[in-house]
Image: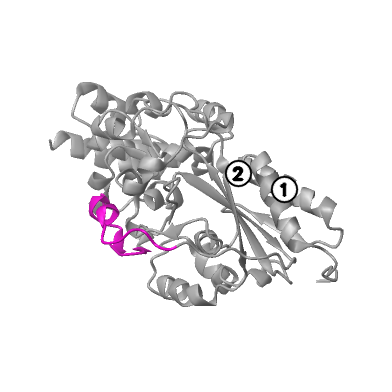
Amino acid sequence: MQNEIPHSIDYGALAALIRAWAHELGFQAVGISNADLSAAEAGLLEWLALGMHGEMDYMAKHGCKRSRPAELLPGTLRVISLRMNNMPPAARDSWAVLAEGGRAFVSRYALGRDYHKVMRNRLAKLAEKIRAEVAEFEARVFTDSAPVMEKELARKAGLGWRGKHSLLLSRAHGSRFCLGEIYVNLPLPVDEPEQEHCGTCTRCMAICPTQAIVAPYRVDARRCISYLTIELKGSIPVELRPLVGNRIYGCDDCQLICPWNRFAQASADPDFAVRHGLDDAGLIELFAWDEAEFASKLAGTAIYRIGHEQWLRNLAVALGNAPQSAAVIAALQSRAEHPAELVREHVAWALAHQLSK
């Protein structure tokens, strides 16, 4: 780091300003931690060694960069962690959608604008405000976009504790929020971590459709429906397809069952409002979208990045799991000769699964 750290600044006052600016920008909570993740590094390396990251090769490739912030921004002294509520205010009840096999369930964080875009823009604005206050300043912003242990950093910064499903939990907001970080070279005062409040509860582990939470605080991504429908680019394992149900993008079950989400608050930000009725759309309707319609309706959302073929793959599995009907079979047959082998394979499975009922 070329710039010298200024010693004449009142860093306590600066931290108070950062909190005020963050709230003005729409963040619900701010915490500051040091950059020492050595205590979490062993767990990360063990998880990777067990192959629980599945085909997310980038996680193994980055290795310890995730647990060593200074390798991403040399000279990092503190990490500012920020939380933003992202639950849409008027989405149809999740349990109700999951109970109707002909409807498509989309993880509630993905119903509106891509949170990566929302968060990154506001994190950049916050960094600029700090830069205007402190001339000699280095920073880098992140929002699930680089090798960052965001949940562990947020825990250290006092924004919550890690639940047994591995997500961050807040007593006041549950887990229905997204996280972002700013790495800085400023010796800001740090916050105290929050105590854990899960107790003996294991509801998140019990309800997981694929039993992906293999132990408290440990998720095997290879079984997780969020991984299967979003991160996995190839075939969904045949034995897991019936367990996916009608979840076409992500899975919220472990959050829906968590008692702390009784306190989760919907976002008032229009960026997170439901788009194109995706909170309660029919599987057949979505399966009929061609690539142009997929692009026009989902551009700017988190869903867009999976692409049309993966979208059809996920919908084919959900249609295979749907209640049997002539309309479902006709919809699947309409894609039986799709140009992509990935789609054809899952359609063939879905048709066989339908006809075996």
Task: Kindly state the secondary structure of the residue where label 1 is placed.
Answer: helix
Q: For the N terminus, which image quadrant?
A: bottom right
Q: Is residue 341 above or below residue 322?
A: below
Quadrant in the rendering for residue 43: bottom left
Q: Which residue is mark 2?
A: 27
Q: Name the residue rendered at 36%, 59% in the picture.
A: 197
The picture places residue 29, in percent across and down from the top left corner, at: 57, 49
In screen coordinates, is 98 left or right of 280? left
Pointer 1 with pointer 2, Cβ within 8 A? yes
In screen coordinates, is 53 left or right of 69? left
The picture places residue 128, in percent across and down from the top left corner, at: 78, 49
Check residue 131 for magenta coloring.
no
Q: Is residue 235 above or below residue 44?
A: above
Instruction: Pick out the residue farthest to the left.
Output: 357
Region in magenta? 195-218
Q: Is residue 326 above or below residue 190?
A: above
Front residue of 238 and 246 = 246
Disc nearer the start of the sequence (1/2): 2
Residue 238 in view of the camera: no
Q: Which residue is mark 1?
A: 126
